[in-house]
Amino acid sequence: MTAAIAAPSLRDPATPLWWGTIVLRWVTLAFALTAVVVHHGEYVRPWLAWSAFGAMAVWTCATTVAYLRPLGRTTWFVVLDVALTCAIMLTSPATLSQAQYDQIAPLVTTVWAAVPPLVAGVRCGAVGGVSAGLVMALCTGIARLDVNLDVARDGVLLTASGLLLGITATTARRSQAALARAMRTEAATAERERLARSIHDSVLQVLARVRRRGSDLGGEAAELARLAGEQEIALRALVSTEPSCHADDDTADLRSALRLLATSRVQVAAPASEVPMPAHAVSELVAVVKETLSNVDKHAGPSARAWVLLEDLGEEVVLTVRDDGPGIPAGRLDQAAAEGHLGVATSIRGRVAELGGTSLLDTTPGEGTEWEFRVSRPKAGRKAR
C-alpha cells in the first residue's frame, strides 16, 4: 500500500514535456545547420557563424544530459539556458551581412532560439515561460537591429509558447498532487475501517458491557459506567471520523477535529462536508473549545450539558459553544483576571485574537453561557467550490 501511495510523487508529471523540449532542440539544431550551410557564402564572418553553431551543438548536448535527469532541471540551469541562447543570438549583427538583413535572412540561431521559453515554462510555470519569451523577444529585436512586424510576431510566438507550456506543466503537477492526495485519503479510510472493525469486536463491546453492568449495579459502579460510556462515544467518534490532516498543503479539517470532542454530555454539530483551515488555526480553535468545555466541567457541574456548533460561512467560520449551566455572574471574569486566573483571557480570547478573530460572550445567571467565535478563513485554507 505504501508503494502505491508514493508512486504518483516519484516522477515529475512534466517529464514528457522535458523530453519534448530535448527532441525539439535537436530538430531545430538540424534546421540551424541547414541554414548555416545554405547561407555560408553570404556571411560577413563565416567562421563566426560556424563557431556559433558549434556552441549551439555543445549546449544542445549539455541540456540533453541535464534535462534527462530530474536533478538537472534546476531553475539556475534554465536561466543559464536562456542567457546563453541570447548571447549566441546576439552574435548575429557581427555575422550577417547587410544584404542578409535586407532580405530578412534568419539569425544564426534560427528557430533553435525558440526552445528556452518552453523550458522555462515547464520549469517555472506560466510566469517563467512568459518572462523567458519576453527576454528572447527583446534579444531578437536587438539582433535584428530593428523592431518590425516580423520581430513582433516572433515575440508573440515565443511568449505564447512559454505561457502554454507553463500552464500545461502547472496543471499536470496539480493533477498529480490531487491524485496523490486522493490515494492517501483512500488508504487512510481503508485502514480506519479495518481498525474500526477490530475495535468494534473488542474494545467497544467491552466498554458497552461495562456501561450496562455498571448502570445496573449502581453506586460507584455507576460512575465507572458513565466514564466507560463517555470513552465509548469518544472511541466511536475517533474511528468514524475522516482523516483531518492534509500534509501536502498544511491544512486540516476543523469539522473532524471537533467531532472528536463529542461525549455523552457534549454534542457537536458540524457541516456535512469538510471545513479546511490552516493546521495551526485548527489546533488553536480546538484548544479554545477544549478550554471552554473544561470551564463547563469546573463551574457548571457534572450534570451540565454542552453543545458545540460549527458553521462554515465561506469567508469565515463561526464556532458556538453553549451550556445549560448556571451562567457567569456579572463581574466574575474581571475578578478572576484580577486574581491571576487568566484562562478566559489567554486560553480563549487570546488564542482567537491571535488568529485575527473575535470572541463574544453571552451569559445570564441561571440561563447558561454561550461563546461565539468568528475567525476569517485565509485563501490557503478555503475549500475549492
Image (cartoon, rainbow, N blue to C red):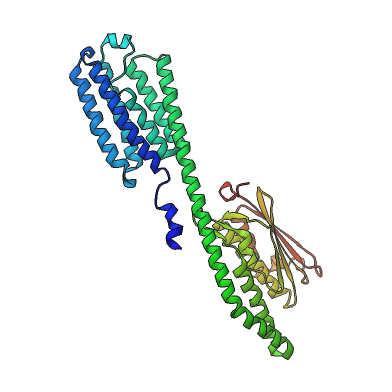
Q: How many marks?
A: 0
Residue 342 visible in the snapshot: no
Along the viewing direction, whichever of 311 and 235 lies nearer the viewer? 235
Q: Is residue 217 above or below residue 23?
A: below
Along the viewing direction, whichever of 21 and 218 lies nearer the viewer? 21
Find the residue positioned furthest to the left: 47
Along the viewing direction, whichever of 174 and 374 lies nearer the viewer? 174
Rendering coords of residue 152 (x, y %): 43, 18
Q: Is residue 120 above or below residue 328?
A: above
- Residue found 34% across the figure and 32% down from its top: 24
Determine which quarter of the picture holds residue 241.
Answer: bottom right
In the image, taking residue 239 as reference, residue 176 lies left or right, namely left
Rendering coords of residue 336 (x, y %): 67, 69
Rendering coords of residue 164 (x, y %): 46, 33
Determine which quarter of the picture holds residue 27.
Answer: top left
- Residue found 36% across the figure and 35% down from its top: 21
Residue 93 visible in the snapshot: yes
Find the residue positioned furthest to the right: 366
Q: Is residue 190 above or below residue 10?
A: below
In the image, taking residue 332 as reference, residue 46 lies left or right, namely left
Along the viewing direction, whichever of 329 and 3 lies nearer the viewer? 3
- Residue found 44% across the figure and 62% down from its top: 2
In the image, taking residue 181 as reference, residue 255 lies left or right, namely right
Q: Is residue 345 above or below residue 303?
A: above
